[in-house]
């Protein structure tokens, strides 16, 4: 006959059973905690609504050309010319001005500077972007000028932009340092109809209104633009208004010419 002998501890439980009991208890406790955590997570983490978004139609092209009436007004005088405008996207903007059938001057805007030539006064001006940015107290470069003419965003979108929806319009707010840009987008056309730029330290401001949208290529383009600039100068507050009214505009991939030369006899101002 075979005899089995068990050695019991003081509590009457065999020592070999203790590790098994501990393992089973810990496994049960772990599963219970995991189930409890998952249940709580489902209750305390509700599904968040999607972040607001807005669609903006921006005109795109290789080359663009058009004819327009250009008017510049300030507190001292008012000037009106007819302008032929040519643009090579992200590269150069060329303008030829005529007054009562006589060539009045030209303008060449590229990524380095702005050059304006007056055939009437036989002089020319060169403006650096750093100089203009300092004068108006907000950043100005080629991209800003091109976007202002085309009715596109002045500043690239990023995830920190604020979006608000109202009846008929969406508002895209962009902030960078002391600059705030408000873009008013028509919900039906998805086109920007107004831009308000303000600089908080100087209270300088730029407002652009776009109207009379017409088809150009496969997009629509504002045939009327009004740029209202208010800024502080050494002599006080200055208000300048630039109106561009197109009567023709077309886009394509056909290469355009941008002739521009400064006669030696012309003085730089």
Image (cartoon, rainbow, N blue to C red):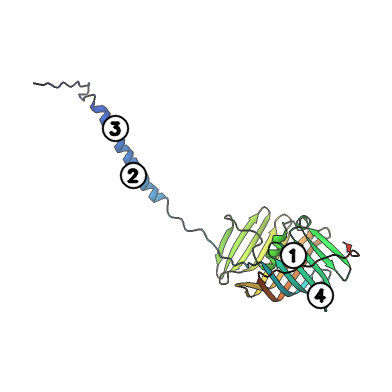
> Where in the figure is residue 155, as x and y percent of width and height?
65, 59
Q: Secondary structure at mark 2?
A: helix
Among the 4 quarters of the image, the one containing residue 10 = top left
In-front residue for pair 179/65 = 65
Q: Secondary structure at mark 4?
A: strand
Q: Which residue position holds label 2?
A: 35
Q: Residues within 10 Å of mark 4 (few under 14, many from 20)?
A: some
Q: Residues within 10 Å of mark 1 (few under 14, many from 20)?
A: some
Asked if marks 1 and 2 touch (Cβ < 8 Å), the reply is no
> Where in the figure is residue 253, as x and y percent of width and height?
66, 69
Q: Nearer the viewer, mark 4 or mark 1?
A: 4
Q: Which residue position holds label 1?
A: 229
> Where in the figure is residue 36, as x and y percent of width and height?
34, 44
Q: Residues within 10 Å of mark 2 (few under 14, many from 20)?
A: few
Would residue 205 be found to the left or right of residue 172 on screen? Answer: right
Q: Which residue position holds label 3?
A: 23
Q: Nearer the viewer, mark 1 or mark 3?
A: 3
Q: Which residue position holds label 4?
A: 98
Q: What's the CA distance linking mark 1 and mark 2?
A: 63 Å
């Amino acid at each position: 006959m075979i005899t089995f002998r068990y050695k019991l501890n003081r509590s009457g439980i065999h020592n070999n059973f203790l590790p098994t009991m501990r393992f089973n208890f810990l496994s049960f406790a772990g599963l219970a905690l995991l189930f409890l955590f998952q249940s709580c997570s489902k209750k305390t983490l509700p599904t968040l609504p999607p972040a607001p978004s807005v669609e903006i139609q921006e005109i795109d092209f290789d080359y663009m050309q058009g004819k327009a009436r250009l008017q510049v007004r300030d507190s001292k005088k008012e000037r009106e010319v007819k302008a032929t405008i040519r643009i090579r996207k992200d590269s150069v903007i060329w303008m030829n001005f005529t007054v009562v059938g006589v060539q009045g001057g030209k303008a060449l805007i590229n990524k380095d500077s702005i050059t304006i030539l007056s055939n009437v006064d036989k002089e020319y001006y060169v403006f650096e972007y750093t100089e203009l940015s300092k004068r108006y107290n907000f950043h100005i470069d080629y991209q800003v000028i091109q976007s202002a003419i085309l009715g596109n965003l002045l500043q690239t979108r990023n995830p920190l932009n604020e979006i608000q929806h109202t009846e008929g319009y969406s508002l895209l707010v962009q902030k960078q340092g002391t600059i705030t840009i408000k873009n008013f987008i028509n919900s039906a056309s998805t086109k920007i109809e107004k831009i308000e730029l303000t600089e908080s330290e100087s209270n300088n401001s730029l407002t652009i209104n776009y109207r009379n949208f017409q088809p150009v290529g496969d997009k629509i383009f504002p045939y009327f633009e009004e740029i209202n600039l208010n800024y502080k100068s050494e002599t006080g507050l200055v208000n300048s208004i630039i109106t561009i009214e197109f009567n023709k505009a077309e886009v394509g991939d056909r290469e355009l010419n941008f002739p521009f030369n400064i006669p030696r006899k012309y003085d730089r101002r």
